[in-house]
């Protein structure tokens, strides 16, 4: 397979992976609706940086490393699961707190914090790392030309950040925000339950080292 075709196939596979429901989608949507459009976009930016990180370590052979060192993969799954459960608990505890979307909201939002939440959520999911590694191992030529190493990281950033930017823009519009204000407690609790379930699943399946 020509290198250019391989790169396009990798990018298409990663776009499909980003579009599949998961903790990243939940966190971006919630921050965009519950905080502000800026927070949603900052979270999307964090997701994009996380994708660049995973592409870098995938290019360095993460898939092979995790397949060889079983305890490392198990540890990553457990650590990622614990973080997601912690994040879910914070969302749950704040579910009953009302939000006022007015001039005071600007002071209460924190795009920098939202960026780090997006980045840490992306990096805490070892399945994302293994997905990147397996896609690269399956599709990237054994000895790719130099331009592949230069082109892949920015292209992957565009895919990850671009998709979650779309999510943030869609969920930060007026109507979704009005719905969120009306049903905030329930929406936050459903979101926290989904994130906690994903974290718990990571922990319970940590002994399964298969992709």
Image: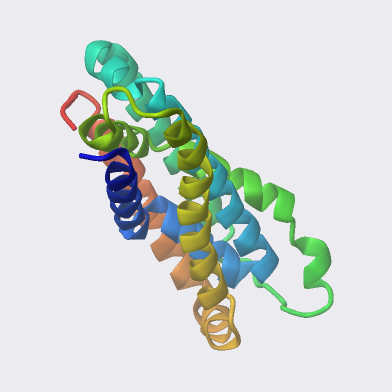
Q: Quadrant of residue 210?
A: top left
Q: What colouring method underlies this structural image?
A: rainbow
- Of residues 162 and 120, the one drawn nearer to the viewer in this rendering: 162
Give the percent coordinates (x, y) of residue 165.
54, 64
Decide if residue 54 is in sight here.
no
| Position in image of residue 93 (x %, y %) | 55, 54
Residue at x 47% of width, y 35% of height = 147
74 to the left or right of 97? left
Q: Residue at x 31, y 38 (%)?
A: 3
Front position in the image: 98 or 87: 87
**Going 24% across and 37% down the picture, which residue do you hit?**
139
Q: Is residue 122 left or right of residue 203?
A: right
Above or below: residue 106 compared with residue 7: below
* Residue 190 in the image, given as x and y percentages of width and height: 39, 64
Left or right for 67, reference 102 = left
Screen quadrant of the C terminus: top left
Q: Position of residue 191 (x, y in %)?
A: 42, 61
Rendered view: 207 above or below 101: above
- Residue drawn at x 60%, y 63% is 40
Task: Give the quadrant of the N terminus.
Answer: top left
């Amino acid at each position: 397979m020509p290198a250019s075709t391989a790169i396009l196939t990798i990018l298409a596979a990663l776009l499909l992976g980003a579009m599949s429901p998961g903790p990243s989608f939940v966190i971006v949507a919630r921050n965009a609706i519950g905080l502000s459009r800026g927070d949603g976009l900052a979270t999307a930016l964090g997701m994009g940086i996380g994708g660049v990180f995973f592409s870098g370590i995938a290019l360095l052979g993460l898939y092979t490393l995790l397949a060889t060192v079983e305890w490392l993969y198990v540890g990553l799954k457990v650590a990622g699961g614990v973080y997601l459960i912690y994040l879910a608990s914070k969302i749950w505890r704040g579910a009953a707190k009302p939000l006022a979307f007015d001039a005071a909201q600007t002071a209460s939002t924190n795009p920098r914090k939202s960026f780090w939440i997006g980045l840490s959520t992306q990096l805490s999911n070892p399945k994302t790392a293994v997905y990147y590694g397996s896609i690269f191992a399956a599709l990237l030529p054994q000895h790719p030309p130099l331009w592949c190493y230069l082109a892949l990281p920015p292209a992957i950033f565009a895919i990850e950040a671009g998709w979650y930017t779309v999510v943030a823009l869609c969920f930060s519009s007026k109507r979704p925000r009005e719905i969120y204000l009306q049903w905030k407690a329930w929406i936050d609790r459903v979101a926290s339950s989904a994130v906690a379930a994903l974290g718990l699943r990571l922990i319970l399946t940590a002994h399964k080292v298969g992709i």
